[in-house]
Amino acid sequence: MGQDWSQTSSKKALRDSRPSPVLPKAGDQVEMEDRHITLMSLTPGVFLSAVFDGHGGAKTAEFAANHTHQMIKEISSHIELKRTELKWTFPFDPKIKTDRLISQKVEECSGSTACAILIDSDQIYCSNIGDSRAIASIGGHVCPLSFDHKPNRRDELKRIESGGGWVEFNRVNGALAMSRALGDFFFKQNIDRQELSPLHKQIVTAIPDVIICKQKELEFLVLACDGVFDMMTNTEVIKFVRNKLAQKIHPKEICQRLLEVCIAEQPSTSLPGCDNVTVTIIFPTDIASIYKKCAKPKNSKKPALAMSDSDYAAACGENSS
């Protein structure tokens, strides 16, 4: 159940019973701030993968990844717990205990996105905070499973302004490029970090959006930080991966080639292609079956989740001024 190939700028990966190769690849950053986890043996038939893209330091992303890993393993070890409890605790419980723990235990004033995929039998759950992204190929169609939390998004802008903040240069208070994140307590009320104000009133909040869909017709999922999508559209990523799978290229090699496209040859921290990059390709079944699916033409029937790049950009507020 579930296979995962990861290509990141991290030099260390969590290992499990199935292969999850990780090789170094990074932009021109002083510190590697991305983290990722993959858990393939939670309860029978349950698979979890998540990426955390840190900013302002790596400690928030590192704490979130470690805490999520430990929390999910503890839950799955209790046989008496219902599977629904695992689903809705993943990867951040409804009370957002992770963010509260970060406020108490992480001294560094850093922040992190969090985008996670949980596959349970025929159901896929995507939980997202920030601008890392999950997209799926269903019958060759591009189906977003998360929507970037950008400050110009209408619902995000309303919350920011209601909380006393503003958006300038497409950034929260002219500084933060995303409107939801773990950490970043400078943008959250009561920044003495002893007690956070109601989550829905924060200028920057850690409340995740969750999208649930069926696994039927799914070919593969791509879970990646914004460094990939700064360089390629959703359609370009899905087309790139699907074409390589149709040629029966090994997923590890596909990840490598994808990152070569997304990392600038001569990095400069002020230009696209210079960010740390993490990308994971997830398959719901064996790779031989995926090769066969991707060799077929795009399905004529458009899935309900399918969305064009322009519609996706509009939904994320990228066309707003």
Image: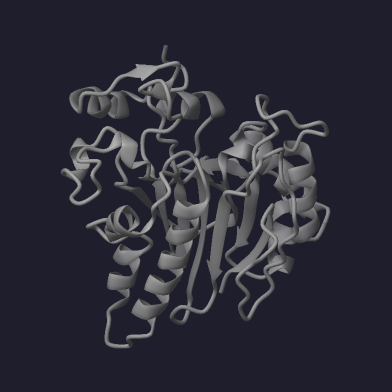
* Nearer-the-camera pick, 92 or 311: 92
Q: Is residue 55 visible?
A: yes
Q: Is residue 175 left or right of residue 162?
A: right
Q: Which residue is painted at 73% across and 28% down in the image?
A: 268
Left or right: where does residue 285 sit relative to residue 240? Answer: left
Residue 215 relative to residue 8: left or right: left
How far across and how far down the image is residue 299, in percent? 61, 45
Residue shown at the point (63%, 75%) measured from the top left: 15
Q: Is residue 229 above or below residue 286?
A: above
Q: Judge by depth and name the residue closer to the eye, 73 or 155.
A: 73
Residue in view at x 43 percent, y 80 percent: 43
| Number of marks in the rendered image | 0
Q: Nearer the viewer, residue 200 or 155?
A: 200
Looking at the rendering, which quadrant does residue 227 occupy?
top right
Name which residue lies at 59% across and 40% down: 300
Q: Is residue 295 visible?
A: no
Is residue 315 left or right of 286 when viewed as pictured?
left
| Relative to 178, residue 124 above or below | below
Residue lying at the far top in this picture: please name it: 321
Query: Splitting the image into 4 quarters, where does residue 30 fall?
Result: top right
| Position of residue 141 measured from the top left corner of the image (x, y, whole percent) | 58, 41
Q: Position of residue 68 (x, y in %)?
A: 42, 65
Q: Quadrant of the C terminus?
A: top left
